[in-house]
Image (cartoon, rainbow, N blue to C red):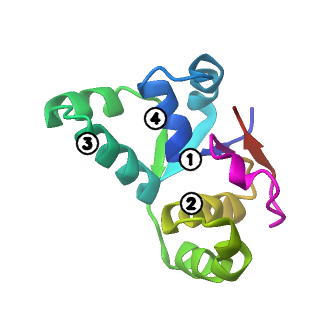
Amino acid sequence: MSKLVIDASALLAVLLGKEPAKEIEKLIPSSVISSVNFSEVVTKLTDIDMPESKIREVLESLPIEVYPFNKKQAYIAGLLRPLTKSKGLSFGDRACLSLGMLLKAPVVTMDRVWKNLNIGIEIRVLR
């Protein structure tokens, strides 16, 4: 299976047992995540008072590669702003999309607002 880029919302669905967690869980071994989105996951887990040691244990056990956010992605994410502003996409959303564009890989998200984006990559909205 080729690489997929997974959004924070999809990874959180797995970690928090939200639907469709089982479907997303099957995708994780072939997925990568931006360091920006990985940080979003860490943030959400701290928001629910998960201890740091547990956060590290859970996330380090996942077979997912974390890609550093680089200069190329920064340009892509910034230039996506005019195309995504009306949909309310955040910087984290655009970081995820920029990684998908850079890798020419499908992006997996739980965020329905991404469904009608036309930015030249496949976007799989699972919900």
**Which badge, 2 or 1, is on the more N-terminal residue?**
1
Residue under label 2: 93
Q: Where does the N terminus fall, quadrant-wise?
A: top right
Residue under label 4: 12
Rendered image quadrant of residue 84:
bottom right
Residue 47 image label = 3
* Secondary structure category for the residue under label 2: helix
Q: Give the Cα separation between the discs numbered 4 and 2.
A: 14 Å
Looking at the picture, tell me which residue is in the foreground, 96 or 49: 49
Q: Where does the C terminus fall, quadrant-wise?
A: top right
Looking at the picture, tell me which residue is in the foreground, 114 or 65: 114
Q: Position of residue 103 (x, y in %)?
A: 68, 59
Q: Give the Cα separation between the discs numbered 3 and 4.
A: 12 Å
Relative placement, left or right, of 104 versus 37 is right
Looking at the picture, tell me which residue is in the foreground, 16 or 122: 16
Marks 3 & 4, CB-CB < 8 Å contact = no
Residue under label 1: 7
